[in-house]
Amino acid sequence: MECPHTPKRKHIGWCRANSSEKCIIVVDTLKYNDNGRTSIRRLNESVFVTTSQLKKSDSGTYWCGHYKENSIIISDIVMLEVFTADSWTPNKTTVNGMMGNSTTLHCQYEEQFKSYKKFLCKVTSVNRCSIIASSEQSNSRKLSISINNYSNFAVTMKQTDEVDEGEYWCGATITVDFEIVQVKILEFYKATTRRPKVPTNIGRNNTPQIWHIVLPLVLGLLVLLLIVLLIKRMKRIKPITPENNNKIPETPATTKIEKETEDTITYSTVTIQPSTQAEESPVIYSNLKDMKEQNGDIKIHSSESVEYSTLMFSS
């Protein structure tokens, strides 16, 4: 056991309290540093007390402090409880909380601890539990304490984190005695994870759980039906093949223009005889062609009329 707050260069005493004002010296650094089973020694800036072959009768409240004249100025109070395999049977409860939120630990006490001071301590090692809240302590920035008569002592932790997880003891103490009445196991879950489920329907009808099987089955059938309908619809649409795409239908307009061109050809013969002397003149034939056709060999279809004329001049 450690007395961490003892002053330097002072003689330190380790005594067992037998009342609120008196204690019996067990060992000290002045002259009683070893009584056979218990010894005291300094190590760096701390003082350590070691007791071997612990007995159930060693349980109790101990004071650690320095001498001043004929008194001891208390710097630390240690409550020592010696457990055996048969005596350590506290009620253990697991408390779940969300990381970052507030979590409350409730300690319940029986009638016999009505006059005791209530406290909550956190287990820091196998044989050490540090008090973090008591019924004589006021609220702090981290902890909020609520007392409902003598039987209910509640401690609320604000803005919890991973450091707050662990084992806590609910205890009650007087000057010469103390008792651990409950053990709380505090566990946290993060907001991104699912909260642990506590079974609440044990022995009840489990019919609502059928929906966990039926609902996915119905959704699967609906999706399958939708796929079948989509495939049938795609088959009804005739695809456009390259042969059909390159085929240009003959327009009736082109045939009509060619027909009109053939129907509008006119043949006429013109004879001009200005005088009788023209009969002996030679005959001259002249063919008039379309100027567009003379400029090339390209055949031009036109809707304009083409006239063929034979001119004969007689002088």
Image (spheres, rainbow, N blue to C red):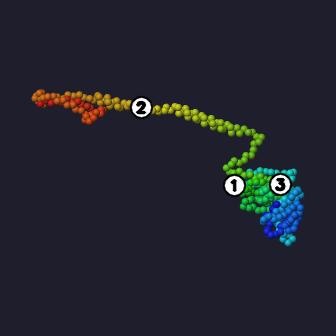
- Give whichever of discs 2 and 1 has the lower sequence position: 1
Kindly identify the amino acid type of the residue bearing the numbered disc 2.
Answer: Lys
Point out residue 2 in the picture as x, y percentages from the top left corner: 81, 62
Point out residue 133 in the picture as x, y percentages from the top left corner: 78, 59
Disc sitting over residue 4 in the figure: none
Frontmost residue, 109 versus 174: 174
Assess whether mark 3 and mark 2 are in contact (beta carbons under 8 angstroms).
no
- Give whichever of discs 2 and 3 has the lower sequence position: 3
Point out residue 15 in the picture as x, y percentages from the top left corner: 86, 64
Determine the residue positioned at 84% across, 67% down. Answer: 29
Disc sitting over residue 181 in the figure: 3
Determine the residue positioned at 35% across, 31% down. Answer: 254
| Residue pointed to by mark 2 | 247
Point out residue 45 in the picture as x, y percentages from the top left corner: 78, 66
Residue 169 left/right relative to 288 = right
Mark 3 crowdedness (10 Å alpha carbons): few <14, some 14-19, many ≥20: some
Mark 2 crowdedness (10 Å alpha carbons): few <14, some 14-19, many ≥20: few
Q: Residue 315: which quarter of the image?
A: top left
Determine the residue positioned at 77% across, 42% down. Answer: 202
Q: Is residue 101 visible?
A: no
Kindly identify the amino acid type of the residue bearing the numbered disc 3.
Answer: Val
Q: Nearer the viewer, mark 2 or mark 1?
A: 2
Residue 247 against residue 34 in the figure, above or below = above
Determine the residue positioned at 88% across, 59% down. Answer: 58
Residue 19 left/right relative to 236 = right
| Residue pointed to by mark 1 | 100
| Farthest-out residue, bottom | 69
Q: Quadrant of the N terminus?
A: bottom right
